[in-house]
Amino acid sequence: MTKNRSSLKKTLVAGVMSASLGFASLANAVDLNLVFLANEEDQEYDAALVFKNYVESRTDDINVNIFVGAQLCGSAPECFEAMQAGIVDLYTATAGGAAGIYPPIQGMDIPYSFGDDRIAKEILTDPQFNAFLRDEILAASNNGVRLMSMTQTGGWRNFANGTREIRSPSDVAGLRFRTIESQIQQTLVRAMGGSPTPLPWLEVYTALQTGVVDGTKNSISDIANMNFQETINYLTLDGHGYMASMWFMGNEKFQSLTPEQRQIVADGAAMMSMVQFGIQPRKELDAYAKWIESGGQIYQPNEAEMEEFRSYAAPIREWYLENFGERGETFLAEFEAAQERAQARVGADRASATQ
């Protein structure tokens, strides 16, 4: 009987200790607040779900909280400020949004820079280019913001509006286009004779509806996700920009994690990148169907017309170098080197695949 009581006592003590350790683990759990400003139809939501599952299934003490839309912040400047304050831990931004903390990154918006889908993916996942940008952004943010991965958030930017069909750059003249906070995107619209109007993403639908702007420079997926086809009906597939996107994390929070946690979070961020690249082509099918069903028209410029559109790239590259100085030269050298590596890799694979 004494032996049984002793055994029972040991079992109870072990159970209490186990429960106590469990409660301690929960009490010490790390919360990661992940924010994106689009809605749940966007590929960023799919990526966020994959990240949450990846991290939480591989750790016992990290909780990923997903915030859709303007719950914690409503624009890139607000979100980066919230990140520095420790309110937001992970946030995704385009090059235009990231320009608020690292202005030279606007070089990624020099028109017609990405070639095609395969080359674009190779550029944005290039390890050397990623490492360069990570160091630059850490330095520019006083070690506050860390680049985790690069991907895309909607594919190709095109001209869309509700006034007229755009067949050449001259057709942009007199139209007011919403742009992001990117001097290069604004310069492109201005060079074609249009009026650039930078607006936060969540204000674009109302601006189109009320005539504050005539059109926007977005991908078909973003247009359909936000129901812009209800207010505009002309789309020109000039592909002047590729919607590069970056997942960022507050560096202080990242450094507070254990080495094992940091590896899991970094791998989870790489998974987000893969998800966004992979899901975009599928989402475009539904987006184009939605556009056509609403009565929207699509114009594909011929090669002569595309050459006219592409002619705006060289002057804007020169403008960029004049305005961004030595830091711009450094960025553009790295960016163009990544382009060359991407073209070489894709070219070699295409040659091999078609022999």
Image (tube, rainbow, N blue to C red):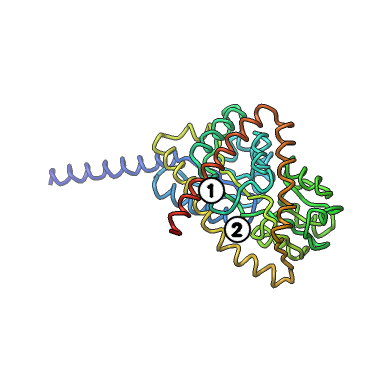
The image position of residue 215, as x and y in percent, is: 78, 56
The residue at which mark 1 appears reads as: 65
Query: On the picture, is 11 further left or further right than 251?
Result: left
> Does dot 1 land on a helix, a strand or a loop?
strand
Q: Position of residue 32 (x, y in %)?
A: 52, 42
Residue 213: mark in rendering = none
Between tags 1 and 2, which lies in front? Answer: 2
Instruction: Give the residue pinned by disc 2.
Output: 40
State the residue lying farthest toward the right: 174
Of residues 251 and 119, the one drawn nearer to the viewer in this rendering? 119
The quarter of the picture where residue 85 lies is: top right
Q: Position of residue 355 (x, y in %)?
A: 43, 58
**Mark 2: few/some/many CA within 10 Å (<14, 14-19, 20+):** few
Q: Is residue 97 left or right of residue 29?
A: right
SS assignment at label 2: loop
The residue depicted at 46 percent of the width and 50 percent of the height is 348
**Label 1 – label 2 distance at C-alpha:** 14 Å
Judge the density around disc 1: few (<14), some (14-19), many (≥20) Cα neighbours within 10 Å: some
Relative to 293, does residue 115 appear above or below in the rendering?
above
